Amino acid sequence: MFEALFQSFEDRAEPGATAPRVAALRAELKVRGLDGFIVPRTDRFQNEYVPPSEERLAWLTGFTGSAGLAIVLAERAVLFVDGRYQVQVREEVGGEIFSIEHLVDNPPPAWIKANLPAGAQLGYSPWLHTVDGAERLAKACSEAGAGLVAVEDNPIDVIWTDRPEPPLGAVVAHELRYAGEEVASKLARIRAEMASRAADTLMVSDPHAVSWLFNIRGSDVPHTPVVLAFAIVPKEGRPTLFVDLRKIGNEIRSRLEEIADVRPNAAFERDLAALGREHRAVWLDPAIAPEAIARLIVENGGAIVRGSDPITPMKAVKNCTEIDGARAAQLRDGAAVTRFLAWFDRQAPRGELTEIAAVEAMESFRRETGMLKDISFPTISGAGPNGAIVHYRVTRKTNRRIAPNDLYLLDSGGQYEDGTTDITRTVAVGVPTAEMRRNFTLVLKGHMAIARAVFPDGTTGAQLDALARQYLWRAGLDYDHGTGHGVGSYLSVHEGPARISKLGGAALKRGMILSNEPGYYRPDAYGIRIENLVLVTEAAPVAGAEKPLNAFETLTLAPIDTRLIEPALLTADERTWFDAYQARVRETLAPILDTTTRAWLFAATIPPPRN
């Protein structure tokens, strides 16, 4: 029934492999005179999602989540993961070899300071840690009376004998009809930012920024169409793009060489050393650039000018073309999600549908748009207790039949050339309990509080985060993840600098697209999350306002399950917003849906009764 999918359900865990791999790492460290080694879950580009050849943490520990770090010492080992993975990590790794720590509550530097033996030599790869991150680790080691030792070749790579080959996804043009701005214009804006800096060169180490700057896309990283490449932008003269030349065809190379020098990856480290010998002052972002880049420049006589990457905020504020593309992608994607929801409502009550079958169906509906390039992340398809695992990934081993009276959570998204989507819907199968309805409504109230927010220019995501949690807090509940993240334009589904979270320090600016996704998770029972994407816009005029005001436009179009709402908990203003949203979904999607789905949508968007 279904074509080959963009995702796999195979269990990547290798039972029994962790112990010998940790033992092999310890033996290699002993040869090198090291007492321990730090294994982050990243690559030299500091990506959230990495190609199989860079999955060192998963290979060593068995943990397959997208955020984590391990420290392996001679007699003990610890694995750090954040709140999204506290359940998953214990299922994948257990506690026999690795003890588990919370990445935020007890971060690695704090653990090192408290646990690393005095005199120990702790190894790390400077390519896999940012400048800021390496400094924090060095400080922690110093306070423990130990040393932090940079290694040239990663010991994991020495013992990982069947390591996959690096990716060779073709580089393609991201045409102007999608990008909305020429490369020359982007370079001019970047150089205008450089004019006020005491730097003559900008180091672009984030492949998302490189892909945005040169209007190119690739397939090096699963579900994120970036090109794994570095770039150097001088104040004057041509920029240089460093990329594996096997990925570049003649046509795209000719196009790129009109504006930049294109050089092989092998030239990158030599050129960094040359910048140092030329005594260049290189602007790099210490929060995202690997320490190895700074080392090569400074050790050869150059200087580092520390500062936030200027491309990140430019990329985050979408231009008119990108915003129009996002709306088109959301319309197309919303129709596919609504077709899925109608199909699910017919199939699930039979008691035969599985989590994997639901994923296959959702991806099939997206493929039928004829414009899907990829999914934007592995689909989270959680029924009953699996829905309580925030970043649950269904495998053939964990695949659960969706049972009557379950709550079912589906978090999914698509990559289209005109936009990236991300949506979560929680739906009832059968009759939900009073507790489920109450908690769903509390989450919905928080979702609507964000959607309806009006806030002055300069407001950060941290200032808005509590709006989404307030109703859960009053009931003694909460969720251990951010309320929202930035979203790229046919780039990463998780994009900085802005986010709605306790740690969201960047101002929300008009043109940014973020998710709005509060949730609640009852362990071993069910999970609830409601997610739409929102666009920061100018707020409607407010009489007497003394400063510019912003608001959110909800972009995502798909119905929210009214069977899970407790109407008595909603205020009149909340009901007005909810009914208007459902009506907008109905009126916008109905003309492009098939007859069966249209009829389902009309029934699904009838306002809930007023109690």
Image (tube, rainbow, N blue to C red):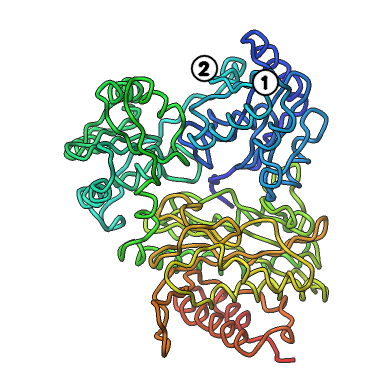
Query: Is residue 179 rendered to the left or right of residue 295?
Result: left
The CA span between labels 1 and 2 is: 15 Å
Crowd rating for badge 2 (residues with CA inside 10 Å; few <14, some 14–19, many 20+)? few
Marking on residue 316 = none
Residue 434 falls left or right of residue 473: right
What residue is disc 1 on? Answer: 36
The residue under label 2 is 153
Helix, strand or loop at disc 2? loop
Is residue 286 shown above or below 537? Answer: above
**Which residue is painted at 75% across and 73% down in the image?**
474
Q: Which of the 4 quarters of the picture holds residue 466?
A: bottom right
Residue 449 in the image: above or below residue 568 = above
Decide which of 365, 377 is in the foreground and name it. 377
- Toward the top, the furthest residue is 31
Residue drawn 76% across and 47% down? Answer: 87
Please, what is the three-letter code of the amino acid marked with disc 1?
A: Gly
Q: Earlier in the sequence, mark 1 or mark 2?
A: 1
Question: In the rendered view, would you say 71 is above or below 385?
Answer: above
Residue 267 is situated, as x and y percent measured from the top left of the image, at 31, 22
> What's under tag 2, amino acid-wise?
Asp
- Residue 127, image x, y percentages: 48, 27
Give the x, y percent position of residue 278: 24, 24
Secondary structure of the residue carrying numbered label 1:
strand
